[in-house]
Image (cartoon, rainbow, N blue to C red):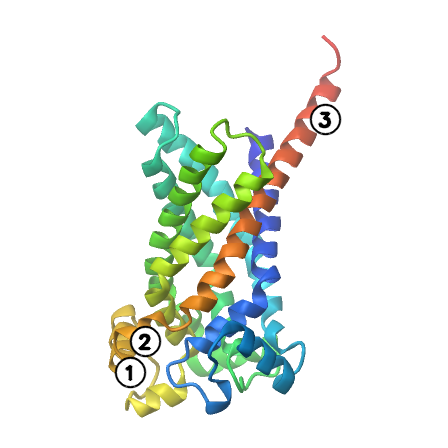
Amino acid sequence: MATVEMSEIKAGAVAGILEHTVMYPVDSVKTRMQSLQPDPKAQYSSVYEALRRIIQTEGLLRPLRGLNITMLGAGPAHALYFACYERVKCTLSEVIQNGGNSHIANGLAGCVATVLHDAVMNPAEVVKQRMQMYNSPYRNLLDCVRTIRHTEGLAAFYRSYSTQLAMNIPFQAVHFMTYELMQERLNPHRQYHPGSHILSGAAAGAVSAAITTPLDVCKTLLNTQENVALSSMHISGHLTGMANAFRTVYRFGGMAAFFKGIQARVIYQMPSTAIAWSVYEFFKYFLTKQQMEGEAGTAGPV
């Protein structure tokens, strides 16, 4: 069991880093498109147009700003995430379905794993999104962390945690249930099958991303604390709490404002989730097989 768990931790760390890095430029676009009152120079009609303009006007590497903090957080966060998911899923499946596949167990395991994942990832998300915004005032990662800590306090790194959980718990419940449901159809024997992992992951990412976009818009507002937008609404100080974020978004743009950036979010999440699951399943298969063969070799012939 310990061998399998270590494989899951390693596989989860690699999958998490690749998931966040490969599609990172699209994530940068999503953050900007969710701005409630963007600068006229940062108003985009599509993901392609946004990337083209950002590269042309701000430089080739600008869409990658904040990637370093994301990589630092994604490795340990996803290692916990996948290891917790597998353990809780197996435990609950034994109770609910006598060891068989249970959609309830899959959903609950995803929720528990999310609480741990977000506790690690939330500070990284705050710094990342501050650095992704147009005309971000921070020189680098350390300057951003120091400035937030000095001007807003340590609590600023967890200001959006409740909203993040409110978004990611249903996101991950839908995500894992969709993935496992697709696996039942495409890979009923649950063997390592790259094509089924990619398709299942993409479908799970698209569905869960679209459903939870309104909460993602609120999370972005809490993380970035858009000064221009908040000032225009006569909101002084720092915006806190999911309820306040919901009210602010609605007052600013009605129901439509809750779906700002949905195109970029789905485009980002589909390949990211497909990559995460395919890489995770591959490394879990490869590392488990390698370690079991090593143990068999050490044991020697009977």
Instruction: Nearest to the eye among marks 3 and 1: give it.
Output: 1
Q: Which residue is drawn at 33% across and 86% down?
A: 237
Earlier sequence position, callout 3 versus callout 1:
1
For disc 3, the marked residue is 294
Q: Which of 156 and 67 is in front in this view?
A: 67
Three-letter code for the amino acid on which mark 1 is drawn: Phe
For disc 2, the marked residue is 257
- Give residue 296's position: percent from left, percent from top: 70, 20
Q: How far apart are marks 3 and 2 (CA)?
A: 55 Å
Three-letter code for the amino acid on which mark 2 is drawn: Ala
Q: Residue 252 carries which label?
A: 1
Q: Where is the C terminus found, in terms of image quarters?
A: top right
Q: Distance between the residues labelled 2 and 1?
A: 7 Å
- Give residue 118's position: percent from left, percent from top: 44, 57
Does residue 64 appear to the left or right of 294 in the view shown?
A: left
Does residue 173 appear to the left or right of 29 in the view shown?
A: left
SS at badge 3: helix
Is 244 drawn above or below residue 197 in the view shown?
A: below
- Give residue 128's position: percent from left, percent from top: 53, 71
For residue 143, which quarter of the picture?
Answer: bottom right
Q: Residue at x 29, y 87 (%)?
A: 235
